[in-house]
Amino acid sequence: MLGDGIADRWPRLFHMAEAQSWPSIQRYGLLSTQALWDFYEVRQPQRDDLLARKRPQSVQINYLEHGTAGP
């Protein structure tokens, strides 16, 4: 499997995130892009576009219940 031995070789993993996202990460956990889109109920066609391409800049998404994710 691709991930076998990664934790042994690199026991510390760092992730970059916007400073203002820390409260959300503490509350909901560190979500993958796809899990974040699910959580914020991002719909088509924006969803496929955001998941299918490299995003050179952060994208802000909003959801009344969860607030804002992104810059």
Image: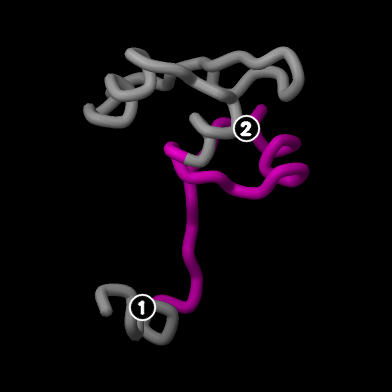
Q: Position of residue 44 (x, y in %)?
A: 38, 16
**Frontmost residue, 40 versus 60:** 40
The residue pinned by badge 2 equals: 19
* 70 left or right, relative to 20: left
Q: Is residue 23 magenta?
A: yes
The correct choice, above or below, for 14 with respect to 49 in the image is: below
Of badges 1 and 2, nearer the viewer stands 1
CB under 8 Å between discs 1 and 2: no
**Frontmost residue, 18 versus 32:** 32
Chosen colour scheme: one colour
**Residue 70: image tag:** none
**Frontmost residue, 30 versus 19:** 30
The residue pinned by badge 1 equals: 6
Taking the spot 22% from the left edge, 27% from the top edge, the residue there is 53
Precedes in sequence: disc 1 or disc 2: 1
The correct choice, above or below, for 11 with respect to 38 in the image is: below
Query: For numbered disc 2, what is the local secondary structure?
Result: helix
Q: Is residue 24 magenta?
A: yes
The correct choice, above or below, for 50 with respect to 29 in the image is: above
**Frontmost residue, 23 versus 65:** 65
Whole-angstrom CA distance, mark 1 to mark 2, is 27 Å
Report the span colored magenta. 10-34
Q: Position of residue 57 (x, y in %)?
A: 35, 19
Q: Position of residue 9 (x, y in %)?
A: 36, 83
Circle 2: is it few (<14), some (14-19), or many (20+) Cα within 10 Å?
A: few
Q: Amino acid at mark 1?
A: Ile
* 26 left or right, relative to 42: right
Q: Position of residue 33 (x, y in %)?
A: 44, 38
Taking the spot 48% from the left edge, 78% from the top edge, the residue there is 11
Circle 1: is it few (<14), some (14-19), or many (20+) Cα within 10 Å?
A: few
Q: Amino acid at mark 2?
A: Ala
Taking the spot 55% from the left edge, 45% from the top edge, the residue there is 31
